[in-house]
């Protein structure tokens, strides 16, 4: 009887389910799923696009009289076409691109540092300046351009004519419709729009300055200008270098909302186009064979132009960064 009771009280065996996925394997699967989409986007929109863009610079595509597409590769045909286009354009696009950058750099690029310092020190009206100068950066460019055109073409001329009592040909006409002033007004718009982003970044950099450094300098009797020149500027100099380098790198690819202002044709008609606008308009047209009225390049020629721009701007930006870092103000 005792033996029977002993046998009946023996614990039942529990069989654990086999573990097909270990903790390490589960983590690996989770990590793989999390990075799969970003990695695919990187391969598709960066690696593939850049490789194909590089190959397109040497690819020539033509259509014969039967409408058949023929493709072959040439080391120099697209590049010769680009140089011929730039010469026929009288290098206007390059000149406008350079002029846009340097005028913008010495106006909004430099002045935004002083405005940022004014806002950072919370002088009188700094909050108003901050709102009005940064507000354009968060509003759609199309809305801003429409408002800007309305001010130039209707509000200012109407107010001017009513105040002086002028009518007809004696009065002021729409400012943006004047052929000789189109470039000036577009450039003024670009300069004003450039303040917002700069001020946001510069004020952010200034806000990161250690307060103890500023207080120590004030105890030593420095004034606002000395504080700016000897403390604030050296400490935000890396931000200034970043803005300068990125601006230089984008000289020949930027276009100041010309399409929003005038559409596709007028920038070429009035010779206010930049090289960046030429690239934009050519890609928008999307022709692999022909150009439109001699103003645009084919996509393969745009790729060749992109390689030329990279070949010029890559060493330029690297050298400029090294020079600015070596000879700029020091925090020591």
Image: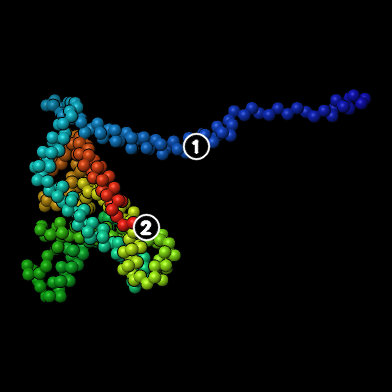
Q: Which residue is mark 1?
A: 31
Residue at 20 percent of width and 60 percent of height:
188
Q: Is residue 48 left or right of residue 283?
A: right
> Residue at (78%, 28%) from the top-left corner?
12
Residue position marked by numbered label 2 in the rendering: 332
Of mark 2 and mark 1, the one earlier in the sequence is 1
Secondary structure category for the residue under label 1: helix
Q: Position of residue 93 (x, y in %)?
A: 15, 47
Of residues 125 and 11, the one drawn nearer to the viewer in this rendering: 125
275 to 17, vertically: above or below: below
- Residue drawn at x 11%, y 75% as measured from the top left: 165
Residue 179 percent coordinates (x, y): 10, 57
Residue 234 position by quadrant: bottom left
Name the disc covering residue 7, or none. Answer: none
| Residue 283 is at least partly visible in this image | no
Q: Residue 163, located in which quarter of the rendered image?
A: bottom left
Quadrant containing the N terminus is top right
Dot 2: within a 10 Å radius of its alpha carbon, few (fewer than 14), some, or many (20 or more) residues?
Answer: few
Lateral position of residue 135 relative to residue 180, left or right = right
- Neighbor class of circle 1 (other Cα within 10 Å; few <14, some 14-19, many 20+) is few
x, y (%) of residue 45? 33, 37
Q: Residue at x 34, y 71 (%)?
A: 223
Q: In the figure, is residue 155 to the left or right of 115?
A: left
Whether residue 134 is situated above or below residue 69 in the rendered picture: below
Determine the secondary structure under disc 2.
loop
Residue 42 visible to an observer of this rendering: yes
């Amino acid at each position: 009887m005792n033996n029977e009771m002993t046998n009946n009280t023996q614990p039942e065996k529990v069989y654990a389910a086999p573990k097909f996925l270990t903790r390490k394997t589960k983590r690996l699967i989770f990590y793989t799923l999390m990075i799969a989409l970003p990695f695919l986007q990187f391969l598709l929109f960066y690696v593939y696009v850049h490789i194909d863009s590089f190959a397109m610079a040497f690819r020539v595509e033509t259509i014969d009289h039967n409408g058949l597409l023929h493709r072959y590769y040439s080391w120099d045909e697209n590049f010769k076409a680009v140089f011929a286009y730039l010469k026929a354009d009288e290098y206007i696009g390059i000149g406008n691109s350079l002029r846009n950058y340097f005028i913008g750099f010495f106006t909004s690029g430099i002045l935004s540092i002083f405005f940022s310092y004014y806002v950072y020190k919370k002088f009188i009206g700094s909050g108003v300046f901050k709102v009005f100068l940064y507000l354009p950066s968060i509003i759609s460019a199309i809305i801003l351009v429409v408002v800007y055109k309305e001010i130039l073409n209707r509000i200012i001329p109407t107010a001017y004519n009513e105040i002086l009592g002028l009518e007809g040909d004696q009065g002021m006409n729409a400012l943006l419709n004047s052929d000789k002033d189109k470039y000036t007004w577009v450039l003024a718009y670009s300069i004003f729009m450039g303040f917002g982003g700069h001020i946001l970044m510069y004020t952010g950099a200034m806000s990161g300055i250690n307060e103890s450094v500023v207080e120590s300098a004030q105890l030593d009797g420095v004034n606002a200008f000395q504080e700016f020149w000897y403390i604030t500027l050296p400490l935000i100099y890396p931000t200034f270098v970043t803005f300068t380098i990125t601006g230089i790198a984008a000289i020949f690819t930027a276009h100041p909302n010309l399409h929003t202002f005038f559409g596709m044709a007028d920038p070429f008609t009035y010779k206010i186009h930049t090289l960046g606008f030429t690239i934009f308009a050519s890609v928008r047209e999307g022709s692999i064979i022909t150009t439109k009225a001699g103003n645009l390049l084919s996509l393969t020629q745009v790729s060749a132009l992109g390689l030329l721009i990279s070949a010029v701007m890559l060493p330029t930006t690297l050298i400029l960064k090294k020079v600015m870092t070596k000879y700029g103000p020091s925090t020591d």
